């Protein structure tokens, strides 16, 4: 492995504006977020690792708001058909529309259940 293709955790921290202790926590809970070179215990990150950290950051926090738990985010990222665009939260208006749609579906299902009884 060529060490020049990798950056340290402190550099990633500055690049993504995430504290190093948060990156370490994520890395210890989600496989494949960092690469260890030559058996060292230091964490190094390549382009793919950084991309995954950006995705994880957007799943967990967008505009200072929490979205998914780390367990849910981990499961989303494990999915082979994972598409980050389908999980990004655009704004509060789209969230409200989504919640309204879910409530409408829920009400329709409840009505169907009542009809069958």
Image (cartoon, helix red, strand yellow):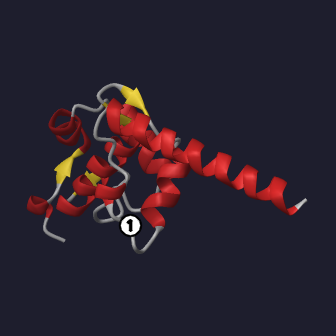
Residue 64 versus residue 78 in the image, above or below? above
Q: Can residue 43 be seen in this view?
A: no
**Which quadrant is home to the N terminus?**
bottom left
Which residue is located at x 42 percent, y 74 percent? 80
Q: Who is closer to the viewer here, 100 or 57?
A: 100
Q: Which residue lies furthest to the top in this view?
A: 64
Circle 1 Cα neighbour tier, 10 Å, few/some/many (<14 / 14–19 / ≥20): few
Is residue 10 found left or right of 111 in the rendered image?
left
- Residue 82 lies, in percent from the top left, at 38, 67
Give the x, y percent position of residue 83: 33, 64
As drawn, the residue found furthest toward the left would be: 4
Task: From the top left corner, tell me how far across and down residue 40 is, in percent.
Answer: 34, 57
Q: Is residue 75 left or right of residue 12?
A: right
Q: Which residue lies furthest to the front in this view?
A: 115
* Towards the viewer: 24 or 57: 57
- For the question of whether residue 38 can be seen, the reply is yes
101 vs 16: above or below = below
Query: Which quadrant holds residue 90?
Result: top left
The quarter of the image holding the C terminus is bottom right
Q: Which residue is drawn at 35% across and 57% down?
A: 86
User: For the image shown, how many numbered marks are present on the structure?
Assistant: 1
Query: What residue do we see at 59% from left, 51% from top?
Result: 105
Residue labelled with disc 1 = 82
- Name the quadrant containing residue 19: top left
Q: Where is residue 13 in the image (x, y as percent from the top left)?
A: 23, 36
Extreme residue in the right direction? 117
């Amino acid at each position: 492995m060529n060490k020049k293709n990798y950056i340290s955790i402190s550099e990633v921290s500055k690049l993504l504006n995430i504290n190093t202790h948060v990156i370490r926590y994520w890395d210890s809970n989600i496989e494949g977020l960092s690469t260890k070179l030559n058996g060292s215990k230091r964490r190094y990150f390549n382009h793919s690792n950084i991309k995954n950290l950006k995705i994880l950051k957007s799943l967990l926090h967008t505009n200072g708001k929490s979205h998914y738990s780390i367990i849910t985010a981990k499961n989303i990222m494990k999915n082979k058909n994972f598409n980050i665009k389908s999980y990004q939260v655009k704004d509060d208006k789209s969230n409200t529309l989504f919640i309204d749609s879910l409530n409408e579906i829920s009400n329709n299902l409840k009505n169907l259940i009542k009809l069958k009884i």
